[in-house]
Image: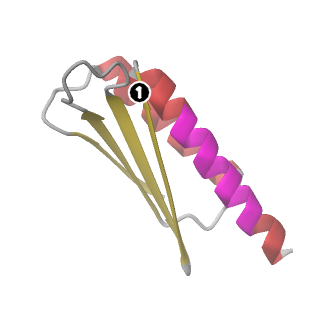
Amino acid sequence: MQVDIQAVNFKAEEKLLELVKSKMDKIESFYANIIHAKVLLKIDNVAHHIKDKVVEIKVSVPKHDFFATESTKSFEESFEGAYQAIIRQVKELKEKQH
């Protein structure tokens, strides 16, 4: 599976990139036919907005695309929320296919 990680308009710390890569590599344990995954890390520049760290995850499998987005005060929390949403979607598809 190919995983693209993109930080939009900022330079992400290596620690954050390693966390994202590590977790995304584990997603294949839930569904083996994942073709591609894309993770976007963004800072929402809305003034006086507490939840400004946005993570979007898109995962592509044959005939399906999954998408999740989460916004919190830290990238780690946002990533975890979006990641768990993707895991739920992938598991639901796998259950429907069996």
**Label 1 sits on residue:** 18
Q: Residues within 10 Å of mark 1 (few under 14, many from 20)?
A: few
Residue 38: give x, y in percent of width and height. Answer: 38, 53
Extreme residue toward the right, this view: 98
| Residue at x-position 55% and y-position 81% | 63
- The kind of secondary structure the magenta stretch mainly shows is helix
Relative side of 84 to 36, left or right: right
Callout 1 amino acid: Glu
Image vertical order of residue 23 relative to residue 95, above or below: above
Quadrant of the snapshot with the C terminus: bottom right
Relative side of 95 to 59, left or right: right
Residue 53: give x, y in percent of width and height. Answer: 34, 27
Image vertical order of residue 40 relative to residue 14, above or below: below
| Residue at x-position 26% and y-position 36% | 42
Residue 61: give x, y in percent of width and height. Answer: 55, 70
Q: Which residues are magenta?
A: 81-93
**6 part of magenta stretch:** no
Extreme residue toward the bottom, this view: 63
Q: How many marks?
A: 1
Depth order, front residue of 31/86: 86
